[in-house]
Image (spheres, helix red, strand yellow):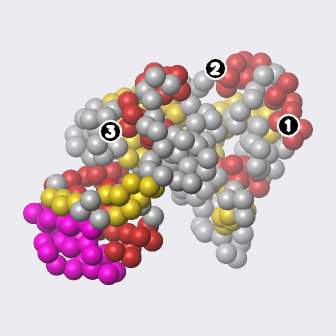
């Protein structure tokens, strides 16, 4: 049986960083462990007050607002992530860049970006443990658990909002390296098959090409190196659909090495025989405009040893 904690009445004075945020999103982020259904119920019943008045879930916080949150019963959080865990300590060595506003991380393969689905913690929980003074750490975007490479984390909500706007306006540029089966056709420089996401009963997400119900999707490709065993390509996702690069390569007959969802077993086994035991998909570079300095920032994440050793063992054409 899950232990529960009774939270007392909370009176919160809104800091500048949260001006303009919807009250429902503010409470969801602040009241970790409280189900969304509970948050919306107390909002609907008028138990959450702003400046002693009832408000709707879409109310946007303003400067000087005082929020009253009623007493709530929540599930106790799991034990805090220990900074002594090797997986957490090692993450410090993966930071490519850090300032008072953001972090750029070379995320290791095999580590989820956040906890859940049986995982005690992911990248964001580990970083919060490593940076206890950074109270507002949030993921700007996500990477699949098995994908490595550049991951952007905001330290302030204003920075997060600015970077999300850049993502919508497509001024954030993410480029990936992928080792795919077969000889990639020079003429295939753009893949635009629409994609539809399905969630199975197990909770597993599977994405399929669907010309009728799929969402518009676009990935641009460039050949980096041809090998007798496959092709190393650079992928630039113009849209950001779930598993987009993995499905777009697979639908063209060139699945990514060691992809357990969309891959080719024979090709994956061939790569495993030369030492590859992870998905060969790596977010190699990331560029964006710094929200505060307004300068263009560009970062490259080096390949981990498993990926670089695999390329060394292939036969170039």
Mark closer to the chain start, 2 or 1 = 1
Give the residue drawn at x 32%, y 81%.
45
Asked if the residues shown at circle 2 and circle 1 are in contact, with their CB atoms under 8 angstroms apart, the answer is: no
Quadrant for residue 286, please give it: top left
Quarter of the rendering occupied by the N terminus? bottom right
**Where does the magenta region start and end?**
43-70
* Label 1 sits on residue: 267
**Residue 295 lies in the magenta-colored region:** no
Mark 2 highlights which residue?
305
- Residue 102's mark? 3
Image vertical order of residue 276 relative to residue 154, above or below: above
Is disc 1 surrounded by few (<14), some (14 to 19) or many (20+) residues within 10 Å?
many
Front residue of 64/161: it is 64
Q: Secondary structure at mark 1?
A: helix
Q: CA distance from mark 3 to mark 2?
A: 27 Å
Give the camera-side residue of 149 and 228: 149
């Amino acid at each position: 049986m899950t232990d529960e904690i009774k939270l007392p009445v909370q009176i919160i004075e809104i800091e500048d960083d949260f001006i303009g945020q919807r009250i429902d999103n503010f409470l969801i982020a602040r009241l970790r462990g409280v189900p969304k259904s509970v948050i919306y119920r107390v909002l609907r019943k008028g138990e959450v007050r702003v400046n002693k008045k009832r408000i709707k879930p879409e109310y946007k916080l303003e400067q000087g607002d005082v929020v009253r949150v009623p007493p709530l019963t929540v599930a106790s959080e799991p034990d805090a992530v220990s900074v002594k865990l090797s997986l957490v300590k090692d993450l410090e060595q993966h930071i490519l860049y850090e300032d008072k506003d953001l972090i750029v991380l070379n995320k290791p393969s095999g580590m989820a970006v956040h906890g859940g689905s049986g995982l005690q913690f992911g990248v964001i929980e580990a970083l919060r443990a490593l940076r206890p003074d950074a109270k507002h750490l949030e993921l700007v975007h996500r990477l699949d658990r098995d994908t490595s490479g550049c991951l952007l984390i905001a330290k302030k909500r204003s920075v997060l909002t600015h970077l999300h706007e850049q993502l919508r306006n497509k001024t954030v540029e993410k480029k990936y390296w992928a080792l795919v089966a077969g000889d990639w056709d020079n003429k295939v420089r753009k893949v635009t098959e629409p994609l539809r996401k399905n969630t199975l009963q197990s909770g597993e997400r599977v994405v399929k090409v669907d010309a009728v119900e799929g969402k518009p999707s676009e990935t641009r490709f460039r050949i980096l190196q041809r090998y007798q065993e496959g092709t190393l390509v650079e992928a630039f996702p113009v849209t950001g659909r779930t598993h987009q690069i993995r499905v777009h390569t697979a639908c063209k007959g060139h699945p990514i090495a060691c992809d357990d969802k969309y891959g080719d077993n024979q090709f994956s086994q061939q790569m495993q025989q030369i030492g590859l035991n992870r998905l060969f998909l790596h977010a190699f570079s990331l560029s964006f405009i710094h929200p505060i300095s307004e300068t263009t920032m560009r970062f490259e994440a080096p390949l981990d040893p498993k990926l670089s050793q695999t390329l060394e063992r292939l036969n170039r054409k």
